[in-house]
Image (spheres, rainbow, N blue to C red):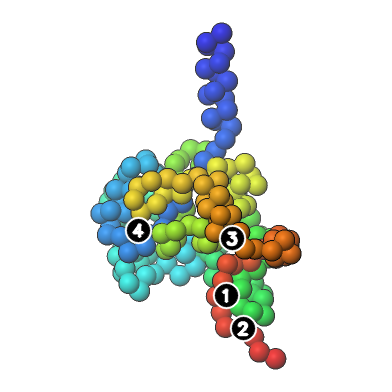
Amino acid sequence: MHMTTHKKENSESIQKPKIFTIGHSNNSTEHFLSLLDMHHIDVVVDVRSSPFSKFATHFNKQTLEVAISNAAKKYLFLGRELGGMPKDEIYYDDEGFVLYWKIAESELFQQAISRVCKGIASYTVALMCGEENPSNCHRRLLIGRVLKEHGVELLHIRGSGLVHTDEDLEDNTKQSAKQLTIFAELEDEQVWRSSQPIRKPQLD
């Protein structure tokens, strides 16, 4: 009886793949690497469209890649495929918001998602962007949403080292949006886009 239960639990854990997300914010390289170690991250997937930081230059792509490699981990840049601020105008609406649904339909994005899904079968992976809080970051709202549709569980590493599940963040979002009307909630389901405009609105 005990052996059967144990096997079932193992089977369920294998069938439920997981991926972490993390935002580098203005942390030191040492603190960032300690967060990766704390959660046994093997591979950091950089999903920034522009892999540079004006205020924390040690997170510029080349510098960060060396630091991660020296820490015996792998660095993979997928900002072109999975970034939240694409260069092509077709991914923006007239108000300057990024149309996440259109990015998700692109072949480059879908190929990168497949690559990530294959990777998490063998490695503990963290998607990395700049924002410490993942609530309104595209790593959660765009990439995370698609990965959840693939049956992947999202775990968000915070700057303190704590991990929030996606359900934790959803609960917080609901509590802070009680004033939202029913109409606005329906509209949000129909327009899957960035939480704020990225470019200046187009004027007629």
Callout 3–callout 4 Cβ contact below 8 Å:
no
Residue 29 lies left or right of residue 43; in this view the side is left
Q: Label 4 sits on what residue type?
A: Glu
Q: Which mark is residue 65?
A: 4
Callout in the foreground (4, 1):
1
Q: Which mark is residue 162?
A: none
Q: Earlier in the sequence, mark 4 or mark 1?
A: 4
Question: In the image, residue 67 lies at what x, y percent?
Answer: 29, 56
Query: How far apart are labels 2 and 1 at the CA level?
Result: 8 Å
The answer to whether any part of residue 88 appears in the image is no
In the depicted view, which residue is nearer to us: 77 or 164?
164
Q: Earlier in the sequence, mark 3 or mark 1?
A: 3
Q: Label 2 sits on what residue type?
A: Pro
Q: Which mark is residue 197?
A: 1
In the depicted view, which residue is nearer to us: 38 or 74?
38
Q: Earlier in the sequence, mark 2 or mark 3?
A: 3
Query: Which residue in the structure is indicated by mark 3?
Result: 177
Query: Which residue in the structure is indicated by mark 2?
Result: 201
Question: In the image, residue 43 lies at what x, y percent?
Answer: 41, 48
Dividing the picture into quadrants, the one containing residue 94 is: bottom right
The quarter in which the C terminus is drawn is bottom right
- Tell me if residue 101 comes above or below residue 114 in the rendering: below
Callout 2–callout 1 Cβ contact below 8 Å:
yes
Dividing the picture into quadrants, the one containing residue 201 is: bottom right
Give the SS element for disc 4. helix
Query: How far apart are labels 4 and 1 at the CA level?
Result: 30 Å
Q: Residues within 10 Å of mark 1 (few under 14, many from 20)?
A: some
